[in-house]
Amino acid sequence: MTKLQNTRGPMTTAIHAGEAPDPTTGASAPPLHMTSTYVTDQVAGFSAHDIGEESGYLYTRWGNPTVDMFERKMAAMEGMETCLATASGMAAASAIFLTFLSAGDHVVVSDVSYAGVAELARDTLPRLGIEVSLVDMSDLEAVAAAIRDTTKLVHCETPVNPIMRLTDLAAVSRLAHDAGALLSCDATFASPLGQDNAALGVDLVMHSVTKYIGGHGDAVGGIVAGSAELIARLRLEAGIHHGGILSPFNAWLIARGAATLPLRMRAHEAGALQVAHWLETRDSITRVFHPGLPSHPQANLAAKQMSNTSGMISFQVGSAARGQELAQQMIDRLEIIHYAVSLGHHRSLIFWMETDGLMETSFRLSGRNLDSYRAFAGDGIFRLSVGLEDAEDLIADLAKVL
Ligand SMILES: *Cc1c(COP(=O)(O)O)cnc(C)c1O
């Protein structure tokens, strides 16, 4: 969709958007409304179809003031009209697929994506009669060739988890829109500061807000932002009927994280660049990928599309056996960096991902798609989420094993 005009800067938006002092108490901080239901003075219908703009709150699965505050903040940070908050990032992905696709429709999905999304697309959607093409989204010819008359949605992820390959959003949005399809983008790795999804033609942007947006590793959630029309459909189907809504407590916690996101993303980016440059100097390391490194194979696209290259790094150490051995040493010897899945937190996290294992479970790629994966991941990668600690301390921790 077209980008909404916002005259305020990103830091002011992150802090103030969606919030206002509480009209009854004057509380400056947004209140936490932990309630499932609301006392009403209207005799109203009992279906979600009976609720209108003027209805007020009736039941928290249909709407909650704390969740609304978080949704308004996220919509403003993405420059989109509105937003639906979901129970997790996976609930955001399944909300998009199950709201905008029906039996007989076709969807083009990135052949590499967050493992849960890859497995949902490959295993669940075909069971529901939805045809799925898994495509390397960095290969524009392959995307164009995959699109059919029945294609309703193109779903990409950039930078892609776990290999840091990028999708040219402006180019892919043209291909999708020429075919009358929607473009959805999982921008979890980039965060809302990484790329201007709305201006690049993304119709639906999703995030696992468990990661950078919450930023503190304490709450799971997701969002999908887009036009009022698309999000109204999503809210009715996925929010109210499938029921995977965000708890008000998690909305409140994650909104608190979101307020400092622009500052944190600058620090994540700076720390990651420092660590990535150091990794490139080590003899034990064969390849390092971060979109801000001149050595990234899509460095030009990163420079054009990304305004913050985020804190994610992947690196290779030669063989799978060597990776396995180093992973065990990290578990035993790292003192600051946690050996753990997830990412985007103030604490640094690292995890080893072997290529053969991931191919058997999540991705099952072959031919050209496997070659493209291996060009970024070799026999396996370490995925490092650089947190907000001093980069010198992270480097000293890593130097014990690398
Ligand atoms: C973590 C993640 C998800 C899933 O989010 P949850 O909050 O764990 O359900 C989806 N996409 C990407 C890119 C992720 O990193």
Image (cartoon, rainbow, N blue to C red):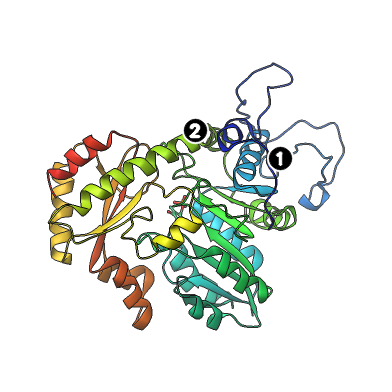
Q: Is residue 15 left or right of residue 300?
A: right
Find the distance from the CA under tag 2 to the CA under tag 1: 30 Å
Q: Which mark sits nearer the N-terminus, 2 or 1?
A: 1
* Residue 201 placement: quadrant: bottom right
Name the amino acid, label 1.
Answer: Tyr
Q: Secondary structure at mark 2?
A: loop
Q: Is residue 392 left or right of residue 261?
A: left
Name the residue: 27% across, 52% down: 351
Percent x, y for residue 209?
Answer: 50, 45
Name the amino acid, label 2.
Answer: Thr
Which residue is labeled 1 in the image?
A: 59
Q: Nearer the viewer, mark 2 or mark 1?
A: 2
Q: Nearer the viewer, residue 343 or 39?
A: 343
Name the residue: 33% across, 77% down: 370
Percent x, y for residue 196?
Answer: 57, 52
Percent x, y for residue 126?
Answer: 53, 77
Q: Is residue 35 left or right of residue 269?
A: right
Could you tell me if residue 336 is visible in this image? Answer: no
Name the residue: 60% across, 23% down: 29
Which residue is labeled 2 in the image?
A: 260
**Does 28 appear above or below 260?**
above
Q: Is residue 392 left or right of residue 268?
A: left
* Residue 226 placement: quadrant: bottom right
Residue that sits furthest to the top in the current view: 25
